[in-house]
Amino acid sequence: MDQIKLIVGDSITNMKAFESNSVDLIIADPPYNLAKDYKATNDNMEFEEFMTFSRNWLTEATRILKPGGTIYVFMGMRLISYTHVIMEQELGLEFHNWITWHYTQGLGKKKGFSSRHDDILMFTKSGKNPTFNLDDIRIPQKYYRSINNMRGANPGNVWEFSHVHYSQSNRKAHPTQKPEGVIERMILASSNKNDIVLDPFSGSGTTVRVAQQSGRKAIGIDIEPSFIEETKKRLAEPFNGFDSIDERMLRVPNDLNDEEIRREYFKNHIEWFLKNHEGSLITYFTDFKNKYDSKMSKEEILEFENTVKKYNVKLKKSRVKKNIDPDLELNTTISLF
Ligand SMILES: C[S@@+](CC[C@H](N)C(=O)[O-])C[C@H]1O[C@@H](n2cnc3c(N)ncnc32)[C@H](O)[C@@H]1O
């Protein structure tokens, strides 16, 4: 199949045309029934209608998922327990996790508690061992300790990522665009290169964009034609790193006191945790220097600065692509030299 396929139309009708057991990973972010304006649909069903809709699309999704394949489903907290029952009790999928996507900003309620999380169900289809690439989604340790695995820790099932704000350059004209960092973690964990990832409610195209930049094949379906048109443009944009990151990816472990280990760790951290997050490198470099400056030998400082310069050149190249003056100091680089 093509690397990326985009389909305008109803996801249930379109999934019916897929072969059974043909998709490696499904990331579904259906309407939460919160009356959002998705143009073609009004996201405002009666409870029973919503249940029938959920049952129908989940039945097709389960049929086309390969044995051992994973399905992640986003859902708002009012209806997620019903979605869980459909997936586990009615469709026989295997429960793996209930992930909480926590964010710190949002509407402040005057009465009652403000919402600060969305939830994601993670199920797999039985028949084969599911793919789970832990090494690709680890987060840095807080401390350098020989008992800790310096390759990093499991990120757990509470994920903090900011929403993509309207002021951010990657914000699209879609009311519920998800952060690329959230989708990146799912794709890296639960699929391999060239696997097929399906998003049956692709909206602004977050899943297909992340799949494209992660070497996976992807299929996106959305009923609203303008969202698919915007997704095509998004896929053609130059790539300068994903639009969001779990802040823990930036943390520099304490107690990296041995110079040899610290020098090796400094470079490994970039490769292990900040690949595809070019925009966050400056923060990492600054924090690393602030934490270990007083301990660094002359050779180590030279090596550190060479690495920083190497990546800064890359940053400048991406600025040129974006028509930003390459010599304009946009961040804290200045303080490093
Ligand atoms: C929550 S949004 C998805 C947002 C997406 N994850 C993103 O990051 O932009 C849900 C999407 O489902 C689409 N949709 C609603 N009903 C649909 C249906 N029956 N078939 C296909 N798409 C549908 C809407 O147009 C909307 O874009």
Image: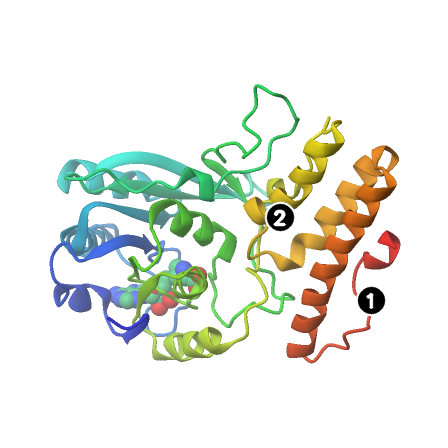
- Residue at the image position 76 percent from the left and 43 percent from the top: 287
Q: Residue furthest top?
A: 147
Q: Quadrant of residue 6?
A: bottom left
Query: Which one is nearer the viewer's eye here, 32 or 284?
Result: 284
Between the residue at mark 2 and the residue at mark 1, the CA separation in whole angstroms equals 22 Å
- Circle 1 is placed at which residue position? 329
Query: Which one is nearer the viewer's eye here, 57 or 146?
Result: 146
Residue 243 appears in the picture as rendered = yes
Under mark 1, the amino acid is Glu
Q: Quadrant of residue 204?
A: bottom left
Query: Which one is nearer the viewer's eye here, 107 or 271?
Result: 271
Under mark 2, the amino acid is Ile
- Circle 2 is placed at which residue position? 270
Is residue 108 depicted above or below 198 in this figure? above
Residue 203: x and y in percent read 39, 67
Is residue 112 depicted above or below 38 in this figure? above
- Residue at the image position 37 percent from the left and 49 percent from the top: 74
Quarter that holds the N terminus:
bottom left
- Residue at the image position 65 percent from the left and 43 percent from the top: 250
Is 232 on the left or on the right of 318, as rendered?
left
Residue 179 appears in the picture as rendered = no
Residue 39: x and y in percent read 38, 74
- Residue at the image position 47 percent from the left and 50 percent from the top: 182
Q: Earlier in the sequence, mark 2 or mark 1?
A: 2
Is residue 198 depicted above or below 69 in this figure? below
Ligand 1 found in image quarter: bottom left
